[in-house]
Image: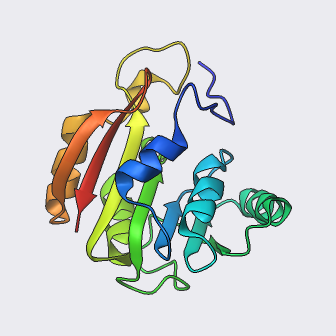
Amino acid sequence: MDTPSHLSADVIDPITLLKKAGVGTGLVVADMGVGRNLAFMLNASAMVTATGTVYALDVIKEILRLAEESAKAAGAQNVVTVWTDLELYGAAKRVIDGSVDVGLLINTLFQSAKKADMLRECVRMIKPGGTLLVVEWKPVQTAIGPEVRVRVHPEEMKKLAQQQQLTLVEEFEAGEYHWAMLFRK
């Protein structure tokens, strides 16, 4: 099954999800595993305005180059790319502990065999009272998306979040192919 490298707004709507996560003027947002679908990063950049910051984190340098080019083309001067491995605690040294208002973990966990380690690193960056939006592929066969066996089940996510002392604020569908959860640290 193919995963499109760029998901259109009819598959997953970044603006609605960013609003639900509370992204707004002056905030610090981290797109944790920014990937090739730069819509979350670019929309978050516009929503936090020049007074905010958007970190675009990824382990693939080519994706970070694309993120920088896209941000520059969009006139987004508040995007900071960070090369890191989210599976390694403290690896994203450019993002200070407890400095992020809103973390975005969108279609990233399913790619990792070390989900608990990845979530621990993401939570490290979020400030107390900050939020983490997790969006993943529904764990059923769909017309697009990764193999079902690698998808993250919502119950697994709840257990991982509980281990990190995250509070579930809301659980909802994020379109036909995705589930979403909003957590508070």
Residue 60 shows in this picture = yes
Front residue of this view, candidates 26 and 71: 26
Residue at 38% of width from left, 73% of height from top? Answer: 101
Residue at 76% of width from left, 63% of height from top? Answer: 71
Locate residue 123, reporting x and y percent: 32, 69
> Which quadrant, please, contains the N terminus?
top right
Residue at 57% of width from left, 51% of height from top? Answer: 40
- Position of 49 compared to 122: left or right? right
* Res 52 → quadrant: bottom right
Residue 84 shows in this picture = no
Front residue of this view, candidates 23 and 139: 23
- Position of 185 compared to 63: left or right? left
Front residue of this view, candidates 67 and 33: 67
Residue at 28% of width from left, 45% of height from top? Answer: 181
Locate residue 33, reporting x and y percent: 55, 57
Locate residue 118, reporting x and y percent: 39, 61
Name the colour scheme.
rainbow
**Does residue 183 lie above or below 11 as drawn?**
below
* Res 156 → quadrant: top left
Locate residue 142, reporting x and y percent: 47, 14
